[in-house]
C-alpha cells in the first residue's frame, strides 16, 4: 500500500494528478526540467526534484533518473500521466522491479496494445470487430502486402504497427501506388519509432472517432464510463472532445453494444486501471476497434463531468488494490460536456506554436465551467513541450446548453502574452455543422479554417431546429448584455488596460 506518489509529468496533467493525490491524503513528489523550475506542478507538490535540461529526452523521458528520485524521496508509487513514459512497457516494468507501484496497466497490456497488429489480432480472437485488413502478428514483407491488398480492396490505409496518431500512415487509392507508399510509410515509421513494420486496413470513409473510457480493478471488474466524441482533430491533434457523442446520442442500445465490446477488448489483454478503446464508426452505424490507449487521456474530464466519477482518484484506488467504487449499473451519463483544448499557437498563422511569458490570465468561471490549466500569470511558455496550456471544460443539461456555455466561457477567457487558438474555437462554436453535430474526422481540415469561410449550409431540418433554439437563446443573451457589445471585438490588450483602470 502506497502513500507517497511521484508524478512523472508536467503541465496541466501533473497538476490534475496532484489534486487527486491531495484529496486522497497522499504525499506528492514533482519532478521538473530546467524550463519548468517555476512551473505550477512544482509549486503544488509537497516536494520537487530537478531532473535535467529542458529537452524531454534529458528530463521527462529519463525513466532511470525518475525511478532513482522516487526511491530517494521515499515515494512508493509513480503516476506517469499521458505522453512521455506513460505507454512504455519497459518503464512500467522498471517501476515494478524497483518496488514502486505503477499507477496504470500491467507492462504486458501496454506492450500488447502498443503493437497495433498484435492488438488487432488479440481483440479479434475475443470477438471484437476490427476494420477489415491484414491479420496475424508477424511482420509482413512488401510482396505479401502487395498480394493481400487487392483482397482487402481500395482505398486502403498503410499503418505502422508501432504507430498510432497517424505517423507512418498512407492512404492508397490503387495497387500501382502501393510500392512507393509502402516505402514512404516504412521509412517514416522507422524514423519515428525505430520500427518500419506496417499493416493494412480498409479505409473507412467519413468516419467518426468515438472512444470508450474503461476502468478495471484487480478483482477483475471491468466497466465503461460511456463514450467521447473525438472527431474534431487537426493533423491528428484533437482540438475538441465531447461526451456523450452526438453520433451515439440517445441511442442507448448502440451505446450498450459498443460499451460491451470495449469491455471485451480490455479483458482480452487482462487490462487493469484506466484505459480507452478507440472505435471508428461509419455512416451506416458499423463500428470497428481502432486501437487502445493504455493511459489516462487528455480528454478524461468530459467523462468525469457527465458520470461524476473522478477517474484519477479511481486510478489510484485501483493501483492500491481496492475494488472499483462503481458497478456498470451505477454509471449514468448526465447532461453533456464539451472540452476545448486551449493551445499556445497562432490559428491565424497555420497554428504555429507561440512562446513567451503569459502576463495576464483571467479564466472563465461560473456555473458548469471547469478549467484545468498548467500555467499562471508570469509563467513562460517554452518551445520544448506540447502547446496545450489549458483545457476549458463545460457542462450543460443539454448539448445546446453546453455549446452556449462554451461560447460564453470562450468569450470570458482572457489570456495575454502568447497567441492561443481561442479564436478558432469561437469560430467552431459558430459553425452550423458543429452545432448540428454533423461532422466527421475530415471536418476541421477540409471544411474549416480561419482563412476560408465555412460552407455547409445545406438544408437539414435537425440543424435548422437546433439553430433556431440557439439563435433564440443568443438573442436573449445579447439583448441583456448590450453594454458588453463594444468590448466583444476589442483586442486583449485594449481590454486589459480598461480592466486595469477599473481596478485602480
Ligand atoms: C483510420 C481511418 C479510416 N479508416 N483507419 C488516424 C490516426 C490513427 N489513430 C487512426 N486514424 C485513422 N484511421 C481506417 N481503417 C481514419 C483515420 C483518421 C482519423 C481518425 C480519427 C480522427 C481523425 C482522423 C483524421 C484522419 C484519419
Image: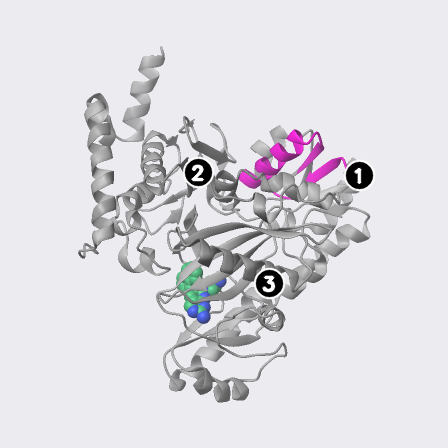
Contact between labelled residues 3 and 1, with CB atoms less than 8 Å apart: no
Helix, strand or loop at label 1? It is helix
> Magenta span has 7?
yes
Question: Is residue 119 in view from this perspective?
Answer: yes
Q: Nearer the viewer, residue 222 or 256?
A: 256
Helix, strand or loop at label 2? It is strand
- Circle 1 sits on which residue? 72
| Magenta residue span | 1-30
Question: How much space separates mark 1 and mark 3, taking CA atoms?
Answer: 38 Å
Q: Quadrant of the C terminus?
A: top left
> Magenta span has 240?
no
What residue lies at 66% left-to-right and 30% top-to-bottom?
22
Question: How much space separates mark 2 and mark 3, taking CA atoms?
Answer: 29 Å
Q: Position of residue 193 (x, y in %)?
A: 58, 65
Q: Nearer the viewer, residue 39 or 45?
A: 45
The disc label shown at residue 265, or none: 3
Q: Earlier in the sequence, mark 2 or mark 3?
A: 3
Within 10 angstroms of label 1, few (less than 14), some, or many (20 or more) residues?
A: few
Q: In this rendering, would 347 be left or right of 168?
A: left
Q: In this rendering, would 244 be left or right of 260?
A: left
Question: How much space separates mark 2 and mark 1, taking CA atoms?
Answer: 37 Å
- Circle 2 sits on which residue? 393
Q: Residue furthest top?
A: 504
Amino acid at each position: 500500500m502506497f502513500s507517497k506518489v511521484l508524478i512523472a509529468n508536467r503541465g496541466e496533467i501533473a497538476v490534475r494528478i496532484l489534486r487527486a493525490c491531495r484529496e486522497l491524503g497522499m504525499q506528492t513528489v514533482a519532478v521538473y526540467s530546467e524550463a519548468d523550475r517555476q512551473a505550477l506542478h512544482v509549486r503544488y507538490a509537497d516536494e520537487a526534484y530537478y531532473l535535467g535540461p529542458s529537452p524531454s529526452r534529458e528530463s521527462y523521458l529519463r525513466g532511470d533518473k525518475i525511478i532513482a528520485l522516487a526511491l530517494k524521496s521515499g515515494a512508493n508509487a509513480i503516476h506517469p500521466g499521458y505522453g512521455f513514459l506513460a505507454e512504455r512497457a519497459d518503464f512500467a516494468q522498471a517501476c515494478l522491479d524497483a518496488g514502486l507501484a505503477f499507477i496504470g496497466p500491467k507492462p504486458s497490456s501496454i506492450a500488447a496494445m502498443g503493437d497495433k497488429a498484435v492488438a488487432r489480432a488479440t481483440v479479434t480472437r475475443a470477438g471484437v470487430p476490427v476494420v477489415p485488413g491484414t491479420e496475424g502478428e508477424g511482420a509482413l514483407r512488401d510482396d505479401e502486402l502487395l498480394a493481400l491488398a487487392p483482397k482487402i480492396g481500395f482505398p486502403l490505409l498503410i499503418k505502422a504497427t508501432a504507430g498510432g496518431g497517424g505517423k507512418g500512415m498512407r492512404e492508397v487509392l490503387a495497387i500501382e501506388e502501393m510500392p512507393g507508399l509502402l516505402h514512404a510509410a516504412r521509412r517514416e515509421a522507422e524514423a519515428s519509432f525505430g520500427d518500419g513494420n506496417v499493416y493494412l486496413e480498409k479505409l473507412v470513409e467519413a468516419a467518426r472517432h468515438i472512444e470508450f473510457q474503461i476502468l478495471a480493478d484487480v478483482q477483475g471488474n471491468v466497466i465503461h464510463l460511456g463514450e467521447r466524441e473525438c472527431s474534431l482533430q487537426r493533423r491528428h491533434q484533437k482540438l475538441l472532445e465531447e461526451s456523450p457523442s452526438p453520433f451515439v446520442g440517445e441511442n442507448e442500445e448502440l451505446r450498450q453494444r459498443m460499451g460491451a465490446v470495449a469491455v471485451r477488448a480490455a479483458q482480452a489483454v487482462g487490462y487493469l486501471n484506466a484505459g480507452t478503446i478507440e472505435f471508428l464508426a461509419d455512416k451506416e452505424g458499423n463500428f470497428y476497434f481502432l486501437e487502445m490507449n493504455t493511459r489516462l487521456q487528455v480528454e478524461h474530464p468530459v467523462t468525469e463531468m457527465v458520470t461524476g466519477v473522478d477517474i484519477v482518484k479511481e486510478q489510484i484506488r485501483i493501483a492500491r488494490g481496492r475494488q472499483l467504487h462503481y458497478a456498470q449499473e451505477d454509471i449514468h451519463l448526465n447532461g453533456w460536456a464539451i472540452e476545448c483544448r486551449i493551445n499556445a499557437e497562432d490559428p491565424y498563422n497555420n497554428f504555429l506554436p507561440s512562446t513567451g511569458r503569459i502576463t495576464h490570465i483571467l479564466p472563465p468561471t461560473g456555473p458548469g465551467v471547469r478549467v484545468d490549466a498548467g500555467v499562471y500569470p508570469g509563467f513562460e511558455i517554452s518551445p520544448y513541450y506540447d502547446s496545450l496550456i489549458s483545457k476549458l471544460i463545460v457542462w450543460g443539461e443539454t448539448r445546446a446548453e453546453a455549446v452556449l456555455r462554451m461560447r460564453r466561457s470562450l468569450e470570458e477567457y482572457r489570456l495575454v502574452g502568447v497567441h492561443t487558438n481561442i479564436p478558432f474555437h469561437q469560430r467552431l462554436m459558430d459553425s452550423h455543422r458543429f452545432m448540428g453535430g454533423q461532422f466527421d474526422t475530415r471536418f476541421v481540415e477540409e471544411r474549416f479554417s480561419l482563412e476560408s469561410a465555412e460552407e455547409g449550409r445545406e438544408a437539414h431540418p435537425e440543424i435548422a431546429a437546433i439553430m433556431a433554439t440557439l439563435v433564440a437563446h443568443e438573442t436573449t443573451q445579447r439583448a441583456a448584455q448590450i453594454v458588453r457589445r463594444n468590448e466583444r471585438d476589442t483586442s486583449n490588450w485594449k481590454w486589459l488596460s480598461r480592466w486595469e483602470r477599473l481596478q485602480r
